[in-house]
Amino acid sequence: MSNPASPMVDWSDWRPTIDALRREFPILDRKVHGDKPLIYLDNAATAQKPKAVLEVLNRFYTESNANVHRGIHCLAEEATEAYEASRKTVASWLGAPSEKAIVFTRGTTEAINLVAHGWGNKFLKPGDRILVTEMEHHSNLIPWQMLARRTGAVLDWIPVTGDGVLDLSRLDEQLASTRMVSLTHMSNVLGTVNPVRDVVARAHAHGALVLVDAAQSAPHSLVDLNELDCDFLAFSGHKLMGPTGVGVLYGRPELLEAMDPFLGGGEMISKVTWQDATWADIPYKFEAGTPPIAEVIGLGAAVRFLQSLDWKVFHAYSDALTRYAIAQLESIDGLVVHGKAPDRGGAISFSIRDLHPHDLAHFLDQDGLAIRAGHMCAQPLIHQLGHSALTRASLYLYNLPEEVDALVRGILRVKEFFHRVLG
Amino acid sequence: MSNPASPMVDWSDWRPTIDALRREFPILDRKVHGDKPLIYLDNAATAQKPKAVLEVLNRFYTESNANVHRGIHCLAEEATEAYEASRKTVASWLGAPSEKAIVFTRGTTEAINLVAHGWGNKFLKPGDRILVTEMEHHSNLIPWQMLARRTGAVLDWIPVTGDGVLDLSRLDEQLASTRMVSLTHMSNVLGTVNPVRDVVARAHAHGALVLVDAAQSAPHSLVDLNELDCDFLAFSGHKLMGPTGVGVLYGRPELLEAMDPFLGGGEMISKVTWQDATWADIPYKFEAGTPPIAEVIGLGAAVRFLQSLDWKVFHAYSDALTRYAIAQLESIDGLVVHGKAPDRGGAISFSIRDLHPHDLAHFLDQDGLAIRAGHMCAQPLIHQLGHSALTRASLYLYNLPEEVDALVRGILRVKEFFHRVLG
Amino acid sequence: MFLDDLYQKILLDHYQHPRHFRELTDQEASVVVENPACGDRLRLRFVLEGERITTLEAHCEGCAICTASTSMMAESLTGKTRAEANHKIQGLLDLIETGAGIGDEELGDLKVFEGVQAYPGRKTCATLAWKALKDWLEKGKED
Amino acid sequence: MFLDDLYQKILLDHYQHPRHFRELTDQEASVVVENPACGDRLRLRFVLEGERITTLEAHCEGCAICTASTSMMAESLTGKTRAEANHKIQGLLDLIETGAGIGDEELGDLKVFEGVQAYPGRKTCATLAWKALKDWLEKGKED
Ligand SMILES: Cc1ncc(COP(=O)(O)O)c(C=O)c1O
Ligand SMILES: Cc1ncc(COP(=O)(O)O)c(C=O)c1O
């Protein structure tokens, strides 16, 4: 379908790179509902995995599987070395000052809960302020609500404008008596990339710490700790082409050292008596029990895969594809894209007059199009936008302009169908 | 090496079954340190994985990878179905009254911490007693120490006799004012299988709840909730041939319903406003964030693999192999096996006069023998036994009597070496 | 599109013109339920006089299937006795779960929901109102 | 066994007959350190007079490598100045991490620990005492 309103983009320079990338992802050959090629546009929910990651997982289990850190045998040493090599990889990828600053968790959600407990329970006092934004994912909202209830701290929000960008006009005022600012780097609903560096500088000037939810930005290789200068940062492996079951918490070493441990168990102790225990050094203090060993090793492979990409090319391609998709979608009558931030990623949420997201998603699925419908774990934001559910198409590096075209065609067909039957 | 003290066992009936089983485990063909066949006797730390599990993992990632529960597209539905099918598999394997009673966690450690927070923070009062045993793994000790410190509850222990069995003579006394008994089903150090059913009955008579740490017993298919009648039960996937990064908490539905959630985030909510949230139904209330999706699905495959085994045969074989190994080891001069419980599994810990476990383990590794040396995450117990470290060989279904013989030969060689050099 | 079988004129008509719908506050509603998958909210108001459901009002911010299913429930169960309602509710739930259930004649227009069976992700949409009424009737017994 | 190169007579002799060892209480010890991997405990007592280490006593419940390394440290550093000690400590740590470091002559018997390089799991055993002394000397500077 050629759409007259669409910007003219010449994709041909990018094409060989993207085609080569796609060949690394076995699932992209999948057919669904019989013979429909899969068009996966649900990447903000979870990303697909390249062969490099699957091979590392499989190799670990068939060659080196053992528990880590405590064994003096060949397998245990191989497993420990691979596990700790992932920590080094992640630390250097993020620009962390030290591997000790990297704690492996189950995902973004656990990482944020860890800080809310280990830091919040210890250091927050009644009346202290926790500042989030109106565009947070539930995982960066509920842990702070629960912490506020536990400690008597007060939860406050940085508002979001109609364009879907943060309204920082009252920030300095809001920062008074704020101890922790926790904000998303990139919104999973609006696509907005927030000016984290600016918020961090102003928060630090008020003596507040900043946690960055990088669940959506890390997959696009947008995290440089030296630039962001935040105190904590969290992301999930599964959204950046890594396995499920693993995520990362970065924390400034001196903060991690001052915090209480979160989970108690094996690995995180130094000396244990019947009544008492002393804690291991960071980061082990926060890694209780057998960690997600294969998953951490797989995450290392995913990060190395990301590191191997030429991001000058991929950032330009992603931007172009996002702009193209927004323009194509907005050419559809009755369709509104939510989120007009100039700096934004490929999570594109929209609503269509008289067409509920669930119905739309269900019809599109029949064409092989995997998109998301619902509250996207951001109920307060969605309600504020005047909806109870939205439809979201979210793009990743391997998506193609034809896939965007197929989405637009699909939406038009569903609209026609509803029109025809409803008369 | 033929050992005159060894019991005469005819292994030939079992042999074809065990050989067939071994062929399912690719890693058992591994050679280490050049050409030494791997002899993996560190199964209590983590078990090896059969092809069936690896194939399911790989198939998920190459065919159905998607986030669960919230998507209306083919992949999301396949992923959700497979994820929830694992819950059904686990529930029926354990004899749980309902799938709602099965919460997926990262492992045993997280499961126990979940109860210590979700139940303990809400229901324990200062002076209430928590009763563990002197043979607990740190993961079933530290969470209760931390809970006692948070709530003012008192931590008490059921003693362990010189033979390594629980001394229940004062149990009823100890149960007065006890609200929670948390004990291991099978000790990872002593091998002891505890009389859980008896403890549960007596605890219930005193109005106390019982949590069973089944990390070591579940891999041997010893868990039947109808028989144990406990209130909570925890185990890890990685010890029963499943992936790392996943475990199970079973809880009586009415208890899970009464408990507070542990982690906050996506998935575990029903309705979220800026200041507040209501929780999803059980078990989802306890599954915050993207769960370990592939790992849960892999765990289901591991449980189905266990279910496919003829346990009459495997229990008999395991018992015989354990008895054989103990007899062979005890024939070594200066070697003492710790744990003489009549009902016991294949975790065999021992000490040898004038030979430190670390040195021993290191030498044995050169022969391809993977065993464990150290405190085995049970420092208080090990100290009570008069040591700071022990050596442990732990057997699983795929181990062979020749592997036990190789261990014994290896130990004798190390002893000789030390003798020779030390003169 | 195979989905046409589910999204028939009758269903979409109820979506466009839901019966017995009016804005209901949480306070007025007998029950408020949510679709955990999407956050859609459904308010239902029931009045039981003796054994008979005399009023059944609804408001739903949801998809076509949820809205139509709620509307069709309101239409088909208003004026029915508790026993009749339970019979029909079970019939509808069985139809969606297993395809079996009460006969076509009794189901009438509700037969359109047979198609949901093939779409596990939509079952909650189609059954949300019915399960809420079922729960309410069961709780009502205790009074 | 390749391990023979590490477990030489000299090492095992120090294991069997550790020098400068006596039972030390936690109170007496200048530092108490643990091997997190195994829970082994090492107590060390240092006396610095001016720039010179006049006393270096130890007690270790550990493996042969840890015990021998502690004993050989006590033997080789007693009576040395802080600068001399630091030089030797760094030499030993470099030897174990990279195989490089100060010359064989200066290392003397300590050369036996070169073999640990190949066994990452044992590095902590071999360096535990040395790192503890290094930390203590660095802290001492602040006084
Ligand atoms: C008896 C026992 N309990 C608890 C655990 C902890 O399990 P995980 O480390 O998988 O959380 C283990 C194993 O390490 C164990 O053997
Ligand atoms: C912005 C954002 N924060 C947090 C999360 C939570 O990540 P996870 O579910 O992997 O813990 C997500 C994704 O679901 C997200 O998009």
Image (cartoon, coloured by chain):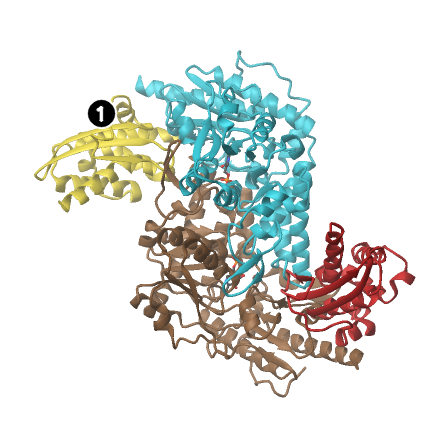
Chain colours: A brown, B cyan, C red, D yellow
* Left or right: where A49 falls relative to B16: left
Tell me which chain the residue with mark 1 is part of. Answer: D
Q: Residues within 10 Å of mark 1 (few under 14, many from 20)?
A: some
**Quadrant in the rendering for residue A153:** bottom left
Taking the spot 28% from the left edge, 37% from the top edge, the residue there is D127
Residue plotted at (85% across, 57% down): C84
Give how far across and how far down residue A344 sits, in percent: 49, 75
Nearer to the camera, A1 or A250: A250
Q: Residue at x 71, y 73 (%)?
A: C22
- Camera-nearest residue between D13 and A407: A407
Three-letter code, disc 1:
Phe
Q: Is residue B36 above or below residue A241?
A: above
User: Which image quarter is the C terminus of chain B in?
Assistant: top left
What is the x, y in percent for residue C138?
75, 52
Q: What is the residue that sits farthest to the top in this orientation?
A: B4
User: In the picture shown, does residue B378 fall above or below A285?
Assistant: above
Q: How many numbered discs sit on the rendered protein?
A: 1
In terms of image quadrants, where is residue A335? bottom right
Which residue is under mark 1? D21
Residue B29 visible? The answer is no
Looking at this view, is B19 or B317 the one in front? Answer: B317
**Residue B37: where, in percent of width, then height?**
52, 33
Local SS, label 1: loop
> Does A58 appear above or below A385?
above
A194 relative to A360 in the view: left or right: left
